[in-house]
Amino acid sequence: MERFGDELRRERERRQVTMERVSTETKVSLRHLEALEAGEYGELPGGVFRKGIVRGYLAAVGLEESPWIERFEASLRESGADSQNADWTEFAENVRRNRSGGGQKTNIRWMGVGSMVTMLGVLGWAVWKFALHGRLIQ
């Protein structure tokens, strides 16, 4: 069975698309594109960036995305580079957990600010009403 990167290179060359053209269209460095074709997935950025590079490559070469993405993910699992994805998944889950609780703290903070403004308003009214109108001073 042929490696995923070799199949990509063969399809790119068959369609007469240069690596420079793919790099220009995708804004991905040649170093990353060469790593993709060589099957050196550890040299690619992790997580969604890796899949984005593959999607951009496929679009630039003119290949149908869904079957190639499935083959890429299978190749990624076989190579063992997918274990790095677990770190990204854990990181993303921690970010989601921390962000979801932030809304409640913000609401409590704004309730405190509202209470302070209300108390200052009541105090200002009391000073104006009683002190300035002479009701407390007799």
Image (spheres, rainbow, N blue to C red):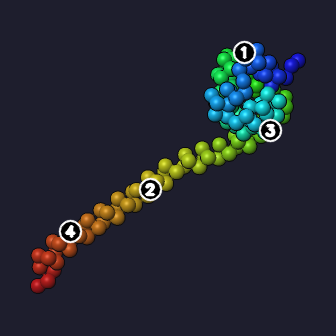
- How far across and how far down the image is residue 125, in percent? 20, 68
Q: Which amino acid type is shown beneath numbered disc 4?
A: Trp
Residue shown at the point (29%, 62%) measured from the top left: 118
Q: Disc 2 marks which residue?
A: 108
Q: Which mark is residue 125?
A: 4
Q: Quadrant of residue 108?
A: bottom left
State whether residue 42 is above or below residue 121. above
Which amino acid type is shown beneath numbered disc 1? Arg
Mark 3 surroundings: few (<14), some (14-19) or many (≥20) residues within 10 A: some
Which residue bears the numbered disc 3?
42
Q: Which residue is found at the position 78% from the left and 32% from the top?
A: 34
Q: Outermost residue toward the right?
A: 1
Disc 1 or disc 3, which is closer to the eye? 1
Q: Quadrant of residue 41?
A: top right
Q: Is residue 77 visible?
A: no
Mark 3 and mark 2 lie on one chain; the one further toward the N terminus is: 3
